Amino acid sequence: MTATDKTPMLELFTDFVCPWCYLGNAVLTQFTAKETLTVRRTPFPLHPDTPPEGLPLAELLPGRDLGDIHRKLYAVMDELGLEHGERRYTYNSRLAQELALWADTQREGRPLDALLYRAYFVHDQNLADSAVLLPLVEQAGLDVAEAEQVLQTRRHSEDVDEAWARCRRYGINSVPSYVMGGYLSSGFMPLADFQRFVDFVREKAESDN
């Protein structure tokens, strides 16, 4: 089914340190490569209290079999053709979220998002470190000097606060979450499931008009 002017916008709630969001971003990229879909990306506070230096995954998930968790994630990443590396830490993604909202005002398509995901899930880099973030800005073809100012002045801090408040208003407590046409779906969806969700919302929107 092709998109129409009446197609509702999809709002995607994500965090750059969420593995299922990394997978969901890949599915969305596959979908939008073949179909038009207006997307709003809203940051979610997955682990907002993570210290700037990061937190070992063993401390974040005590008693969990990290090897088994990673094997299952890697299998899905391989199916989607995503690169992955060994993650030892989770990192505070607040600055990355602020930077992504700034990037959204600079160029359509959010070119920085994929680079932020890759920095963490492939290279285990600290997304709270400007020395990590600014080279990604350059790779995305964006203004590094302005990005540095954005990070120093925290220009988009209030925007992230509002996004987090929006998550609370929707009652979203896990990511990825998708809101479209008044319908909410939480959790990673393979491409076929994502297609069914979008088609369902589109059909409902058309029947209501």
Image (cartoon, helix red, strand yellow):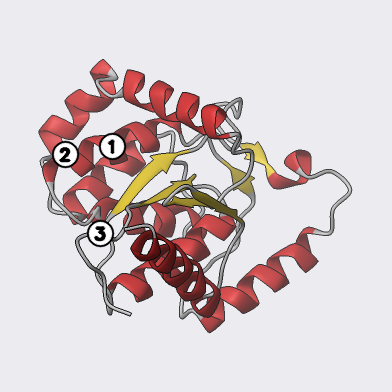
Query: Which-is-in-front pick, marks 3 and 2?
Result: 3
Q: Residues within 10 Å of mark 2 (few under 14, many from 20)?
A: few
Instruction: Identify the mark nearer the N-term, 3 or 2.
Output: 3
Q: Which residue is mark 1?
A: 101
Q: Is residue 188 above or below residue 163?
A: below
Q: Is residue 137 above or below residue 65?
A: above
Relative depth, front residue between 107 and 116: 107
Q: Is residue 82 above or below residue 183?
A: below
Relative depth, front residue between 148 and 7: 7
In the image, what residue type sits under mark 2? Thr
| Quarter of the view holding residue 94 | top left
Q: Which residue is mark 2?
A: 105
Q: Residues within 10 Å of mark 3 (few under 14, many from 20)?
A: few
33 lies left or right of 145: right
In the image, what residue type sits under mark 3? Lys
In the image, what residue type sits under mark 1? Leu
